[in-house]
Amino acid sequence: MIHAGIELGGTKCVAILARDHGEVLAREVIPTTSPEETIGIVERVLLEWKRDHGFGALGIASFGPLDVNPESATFGHILATPKPGWARADVVSPLRRAAAVPLVLDTDVNGAAFAEMRWGSGRGFADFAYVTVGTGIGVGLIVNGRPTRGFGHCELGHIRVQRLARDDWPGACPYHGDCVEGLASGTALRARLGDELNEIGADHPAWESVAWSLAQLCQAIVCAAAPHRIAFGGGVIDRQPHLLGRIQSMLVESLNGYLDLPAGDPYVCSAELGSDAGPLGAIALAMTARP
């Protein structure tokens, strides 16, 4: 079966058409500008694909915070976001009208987690976490095969963690200051280091703080849900792969023998799908749609 997927990110939107086994038939990359412009272009793409190919379901994997409650009057709306113009934007309604097929909506990181579980580093697991470290920090947390749900979706990137000793930089999150995103995201690193960020090597002390903050995030994930694996993606990790080993070592140090991580392959690993995790995540969501 052919499915359509939309990965709506903070800087770009990727529309993708693919078969069940992940074969990509078409892809369009659209800058994320204003809701009217970006969603309008996506509507036109979906209408063209519907006419020329047909598809059975649509998955939308969007940046957040996001109203993911289908019973809510604001289902499919972006909630509080620092991205200008996008707070309270309705993502779902216009795309539902254009596609006219069953639709599944979730966060971009939950979508990426499902893609990794189907085609990548999470294969064979029903309990899995995907962490992206880029402009922001997001966590896709899947428990018993389903994304965590309560009154909203997982926002573990914004938890406050124990600070590395002697590190008193206030952090860059506009909401929380020194939450994990405020300490370890690409945005935080640029705020902390400025132009120096492009010059520093793997031995720069800033990476110790980043690895420690991410290890503390991992401890919270382990203690809350005990996933079988935590996979990392995103631009910061892609450019600084040395962080993965540091995060795992610091996680073990922080757990201090209270919990033993699963034996075998590294528990903290790199996501296998790379930049395709997000778009294929939207396809993985579409594959769960019901008529």
Image (spheres, rainbow, N blue to C red):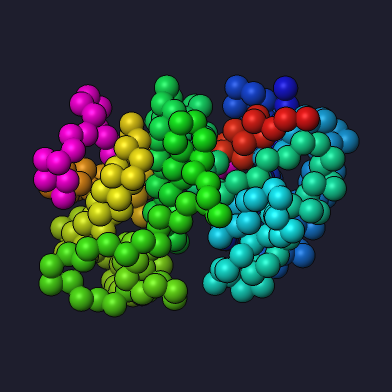
Quarter of the picture holding the C terminus: top right
Whether residue 227 is visible to the viewer of this picture, yes or no, is: yes
Which residue occupies 79% across, 53% down? 93
Residue 81, picture quadrant: bottom right
What's drawn in magenta, residue-wise? 254-279
Relative vertical location of residue 123 with respect to residue 213 in this rendering, above or below:
above
Question: From the viewer's perspective, is 129 left or right of 17?
Answer: left
Question: From the viewer's perspective, is 16 left or right of 192?
Answer: right
Is residue 262 inside the magenta stretch? Answer: yes
Name the foreground residue: 109 vs 222: 222
Q: Position of residue 281 (x, y in %)?
A: 56, 38
Which residue occupies 58% across, 36% down? 280
Question: From the viewer's perspective, is 184 left or right of 138?
Answer: left
Quarter of the picture holding the N terminus: top right
Is residue 28 inside the magenta stretch? Answer: no
Q: Position of residue 6 (x, y in %)?
A: 66, 45
Residue 20, picture quadrant: top right
Whether residue 234 is visible to the viewer of this picture, yes or no, is: no
Relative vertical location of residue 70 with respect to residue 209 in this rendering, above or below:
above
> Which residue extends farthest right?
51
Which residue occupies 71% across, 60% down? 74
Question: From the viewer's perspective, is 140 left or right of 16?
Answer: left
Q: Position of residue 77 (x, y in %)?
A: 68, 60
Name the foreground residue: 182 vs 44: 182
